[in-house]
Image (cartoon, rainbow, N blue to C red):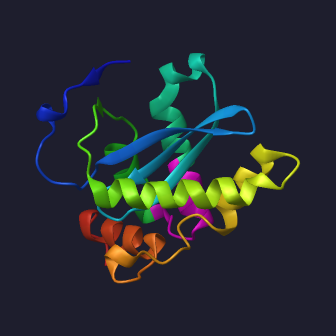
Amino acid sequence: MNVQDKNEIANGTENKWTAHLVPIGGRKCIYFIHKKSLYSVLVIDILKKDLKELNNLFYEAFVTQLKVDKIYNSEFERFLKENFSSMKLFSTDNDQKTMGTMRDGIMHLKSFCEEKENKLDAAVEFCKYSLNRIPIGTRKFKYAKELMEEELKTTANIA
């Protein structure tokens, strides 16, 4: 996997994500957050050998989260495949709004999982019932799932 310098990033935030490795119950997970909508996706229980398939793991987790949030529909299928099934990795650009929202989301995730016996199952439960359902102050207290739905409809040209 090749990480490119942040100076090579093209302008715009349409398809830019920030990611952070998060330990949950002694296992590694990757928390992704979309820079424009602040929509979050969690890839759970990552092993080093899985990093070769990170594109597929992210795409599957993204589509699953969209379905859980009732955003996914067949009109988006082709657009998602063309625009979200591959990724380039860059070093951080230190976008503080994105980083702050991600830190907040990770804190909620860890807090939710803390008292549960099976932490990975708790992380899955968090994705189903809490992820993207917390109002975001920097986005006029909208929900990330609403912002992502608007973003997808706009960029995919779907009414």
Q: Main secondary structure of the magenta part?
A: helix
Q: Position of residue 68 (x, y in %)?
A: 62, 64
Height in image: 51 above or below 104? above
Q: Residue at x 42, y 53 (%)?
A: 33
Q: Quick one: quadrant of the C terminus?
A: bottom left
| Quadrant in the rendering for residue 153 | bottom left
**Label total for image:** 0
Q: Residue at x 39, y 67 (%)?
A: 148
Q: Position of residue 152 (x, y in %)?
A: 34, 65
Q: Which residues are magenta?
A: 62-74
| Front one among 115 and 1 | 115
Height in image: 155 above or below 60? below
| Quadrant in the rendering for residue 28 | top right
Q: Residue at x 19, y 34 (%)?
A: 6
Q: Residue furthest right?
A: 117
**73 part of magenta stretch:** yes
Q: Residue at x 50, y 69 (%)?
A: 71
| Quadrant in the rendering for residue 5 | top left
| Front one among 151 and 113 | 113
Q: Position of residue 14 (x, y in %)?
A: 24, 56
**75 part of magenta stretch:** no
Q: Position of residue 91 (x, y in %)?
A: 27, 32
Q: Quick one: quadrant of the N terminus?
A: top left
